[in-house]
Amino acid sequence: MKKALIAAFGLMFSFFSYGQPSASKRQANNEQPKAPQSDYPYTAIPFTSVKLNDQFWLPRIKTNQAITIPASFERCDKTGRIKNFIMAAEKKGKFCTTFTFDDTDIYKTIEGASFSLSLFPDKKLELFIDSLITIVGRAQEPDGYLYTARTIDPLNPPGWAGKERWVKERELSHELYNSGHLYEAAAAHFQATGKRNLLDIALKNADLVCSVFGPDKMHTAPGHEVVEMGLVKLYRITGKIEYLNTAKFFILERGNYKGYNTKSKDPWQNGAYWQDHLPVVQQREAIGHAVRAGYLYSAVADVAALTGDKKLLNAIDSIWLNMVGKKIYVQGGAGAVGAGERYGENYELPNSTAYNETCAAISNVYWNQRMFQLHGDAKYVDLLEKILYNGLLSGVGLDGKSFFYTNAMQIRHNFKHPDMEAERSGWFECSCCPTNVCRLLPSVPGYMYAQHGTDLYVNLFASGVATIPMGKKSLVLEQQNNYPFSGDLKFMVQSKDKLAFTMKIRIPGWAVQEAIPSDLYSFRTNKKEEIVIHINGTPVTYTMDKGYAVITREWKKGDKVEMNLPMNVQRVYSNDNLKDNKGLVSLQRGPLTYCAEWADNNNRTSNLVLPATVNLVPEFKADLLNGVTVLKGEAIVIETGKDHLSVSSHTQPFVAIPYYAWANRGKGEMNVWLPETIKDISIIAQ
Amino acid sequence: MKKALIAAFGLMFSFFSYGQPSASKRQANNEQPKAPQSDYPYTAIPFTSVKLNDQFWLPRIKTNQAITIPASFERCDKTGRIKNFIMAAEKKGKFCTTFTFDDTDIYKTIEGASFSLSLFPDKKLELFIDSLITIVGRAQEPDGYLYTARTIDPLNPPGWAGKERWVKERELSHELYNSGHLYEAAAAHFQATGKRNLLDIALKNADLVCSVFGPDKMHTAPGHEVVEMGLVKLYRITGKIEYLNTAKFFILERGNYKGYNTKSKDPWQNGAYWQDHLPVVQQREAIGHAVRAGYLYSAVADVAALTGDKKLLNAIDSIWLNMVGKKIYVQGGAGAVGAGERYGENYELPNSTAYNETCAAISNVYWNQRMFQLHGDAKYVDLLEKILYNGLLSGVGLDGKSFFYTNAMQIRHNFKHPDMEAERSGWFECSCCPTNVCRLLPSVPGYMYAQHGTDLYVNLFASGVATIPMGKKSLVLEQQNNYPFSGDLKFMVQSKDKLAFTMKIRIPGWAVQEAIPSDLYSFRTNKKEEIVIHINGTPVTYTMDKGYAVITREWKKGDKVEMNLPMNVQRVYSNDNLKDNKGLVSLQRGPLTYCAEWADNNNRTSNLVLPATVNLVPEFKADLLNGVTVLKGEAIVIETGKDHLSVSSHTQPFVAIPYYAWANRGKGEMNVWLPETIKDISIIAQ
């Protein structure tokens, strides 16, 4: 099916992986989008072309389908989110949830369910979605407007909605945010099912938005970005240039509003909270609400790719360098500051109050994938992998139905903070994160491969089989590995046709002693290990290009590439600018960041010291946390006397677990960073 | 001389203690101010009526005269502050210091020197001041305007000054702040010397200010208050009602400006930084820059007293309760937050970053004295005493030439913060604090006594002799004590005339188990001790009224009142709302707050634990820090191994010194609060 599609448009037509219906469906609908003038030079292979059979992602994707998605729909129902649409259709009642953007939870769950349906067809689920779409469609006003918070009772909308359509869009109403998630969901649903029912609703709404906003029409910078990404997806499906133009208009509109107090340092007062403090082309710093930021930067990448706008490209290149060099936690979390769920100042990455919204990690994955698609550099995938396996994945529990809104760097029994969650919740009043996880997980295989001309990029590692178009032929490539716990990788060609192409396999930064693609964190040693690649049992020479091992040959069935990425236990240290991390170490093995959790360390972790001389040994534990490699060693533990008037220290066995797996065994202390020495202590008398 | 004055106007004419020239000088100048319609019911006895011979204040006042004042004048010269006046007179050159309010350092030093001259006449100093006044006078513009930053080069004033007079008064220019300190200095100089040279300059400026500002004229809320207090003093000297009216106008003008962003939480954006966020009569919270706040509240008290305005009175009564109940440190420091040198939120009193500007303590003394004068309640004097002996006095070193701008609550060797000073400096670029100390110290005896009808209030304790008008007679009262180190107090009547009056002797809160006049801090026990008062060797019964022991009798020469205020060592605990102080204790004995300093505790204090069971014994050390009573006991000390990989605890002798005397022996750790137990520890790896 995919082969036919690619054949139809050829490799020169790069498309974004999630915006693409099957060719047959498209033809049936008489749609024939024009190829964009320019686009991402590096094209992702859609997740639908990759069939996983691994032990890491596949079980999670199945849990997402079996548990998370039904639970999400059920909660949308129970909390009144579906009722809002029904009331809007009937134009009576009273908006019955808290946030005017609660509509998006339904859109996001439909999006996740659609992705999931592509992988595991499920007629019942498909029908349920259809019925939901019918409900959504009835809530849409005749001109395309769709925003239940206003439509239910247009004369008395909730305060946040504003008295008139879009008048509070800049700060509060999130009308375009709702539209954006509708478009994302519609694109996914169309791609997964070929059905137009949700797409038509989205297009009608998008036509209204494009008719209302523009250089000679209404001006606004959307308060919570995502409509820009959504419009780009609709453009990719329909080829309708207005959608792209309006997305670009929204981007360029930022920084134009004159009502801010430019002297204020309050990000709500100067517009920085929603990235509206400067024209995007002048922005150089990851700033403001981190989810919004990631969606904006993703859309900027989309528009830069599709229009060739160099100024936009320069802006996000700079912003990315700022983010990766000064504003990201060691586990890939972003958005350090709870007040505003936002990026802090440069090097403002406190451990005790790290906010790290799960949605911010998700939006950062979107952004990094697009950065890769622009530049074809493995460093973006290195960061994407870091976020995916750590700061993002920690957002959902192993049970698939408990979630973190924030992702802590440490939990200390005597430090309570309203933002610091030590225990996952089933649902939040602001439930953006669970529904965002829903839609992200099934799409993970879509980040594994990409193409550029005749180059095949292997970005992520997981056992499974991918079917990849190669001109008029196609390559079937199998991965066999036990990633992320083992660095033993095998890639096997299974398709019959001989195919001459260049395989570019990402050699992860962590395998060559780079903790992160910046100097923010580093390993103890920076001695580069040489990675030997065997083809069919024989070592081969290869060159490195932008983080990829480059192997060009005529590939034939049975060809086997093998390599062993060295999974040493790494001690990670922070740049001196992270003052709070001075003297502290974190642990990494392969792509995984580790943490010490109470359950493995005699109920405490904040009293542990991990001297630099301690040898840490990996050990796979099949029965622990769905199977994880733990790190074992010996720590110094400091204990106070029962009378609370004495202190002493002794050694104790030490165990670290992958960060993503913490908080699945009850509530207690956790530390990503541990001291290596005791230079001093602070007495806590509480 | 004073007797004659009091006789001339009678007791019914209450006057503010510092605004009063000698009667003979006033008559020579043909000035006869009208008595205000209403005024403070409790009248302070001016410091010039009190001759100290004690070991605590007198040496400090002498040091202030011998060292601080000359050093201050010298620094005014060396830094270009005097040159600014000379250039203004010549209308050429370029304003050569940093701040447009640097003129005030000269005014404040003149004020301090004038007070000091009243106590210790010094012809040379008087002549030097006269020459300075001449220089100041030449810098005044013909219409009375006096602000060197503009007059030097009116077409190119420094940015902070604004292009035109007063256009930046609200936020930046401090033109009226300069005027206010000019008036304060002029009043003091006139009182001390009877000379009109500075007074005439001040009156000319005040006439200009009154002609420019008013309900039908220019509107502004002065950015840094003090002009209001100054105008009241000029009103008291001249009886010119315009001065009082303009002072009241400035007060009522606050909260009227429409240019603020009322939704912002940034105190610079919403006006709270300079108490301009609400009309004063609606203010209920001590807020914004703490020095400005204290000056405003002092002026509000003045105007409330002089006009009988109940709404203003209610406002400062409420604000005072907020300050004493939620916003003051245990040593009497105010203004917790460095960013803005301002009051924090309720209960925001961090130890590690306590700002506690010396000037804020001084302005709080001014305010509390006025609160006493309004209400005649000892609680205001309790707080005044707390500030005076602790958080204010720590601002000046024993050498009289080193100063703290901020007054720390703790110094920790591994915690550096730009605001946290561990060592006094000779002078600051912004030198408000040294010059404010200059003017405060010689005036301390003015806070000792007050009158209300035939009641004599004895507020503070220090050996010396006071001459106090009693109708047409006068009382000579001697105090003999070794306060604040001993609670043994003697009061002896030395005047010949028999005098029937009520002596009201303050029984300090600390002597009856109240740490502070609110529930913010409390002693371990609240068992009230009974204080026995002897007259001429015989115990007498007395009643208590608003914190005073009330003794009414016909007093005759030789009458001796004796009492012993119990100076137990008190453990002080914080209200539970001060989360950071949970489990911590501070020490107090008499009016003195104690601290542990490195020099007495084996070079460290942040590693000390002071269990609740430890007995603390006072011991007077004549050769330590100019003579102090220390507290001795035994502490637990926690030490880390030399390899920084182990921790242990043991006991060690413990010494606490009066807080005011810290940082006179070099730089090192200091703690006001100490833990009583070790519930936990935090490992510092730096």
Image (cartoon, coloured by chain):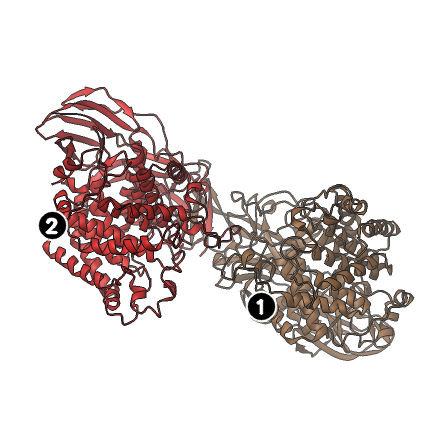
Chain colours: A red, B brown
Is any atom of residue A466 visible in this view? no
Q: Amino acid at mark 1?
A: Gln
Is any atom of residue A297 visible in this view? yes
Q: Is residue B408 left or right of residue A478?
A: right
Q: Give residue B146's position: percent from left, percent from top.
A: 76, 53
Identify the residue position indicated by label 2 in the image: A121
Question: Residue B459 lies in what quarter of the image?
Answer: bottom right
* Residue projecting furthest to the right: B28
Q: Give residue A109's position: percent from left, percent from top.
A: 22, 55
Q: Nearer the viewer, residue B314 or A424?
A: B314
Badge 2 local density, few (<14 within 10 Å), some, or many (20+)?
some
Question: Disc 1: which chain?
Answer: B
Q: In what element is the residue under mark 1?
A: loop
Identify the residue position indicated by label 1 in the image: B283
Mark 2 → mark 1, Cα distance in angstroms: 65 Å
Q: Look at the picture and state if B462 lies above or below A615.
A: below
Residue at the image point whose x is 83% and y is 51% from the top: B129
Question: Residue A526 lies in what quarter of the image?
Answer: top left
Q: Amino acid at mark 2?
A: Pro
Location of the N terminus of chain A (image quadrant): top left
Q: Give residue B581's position: percent from left, percent from top.
A: 50, 58
Q: Look at the picture and state if B74 lies above or below A198.
A: above
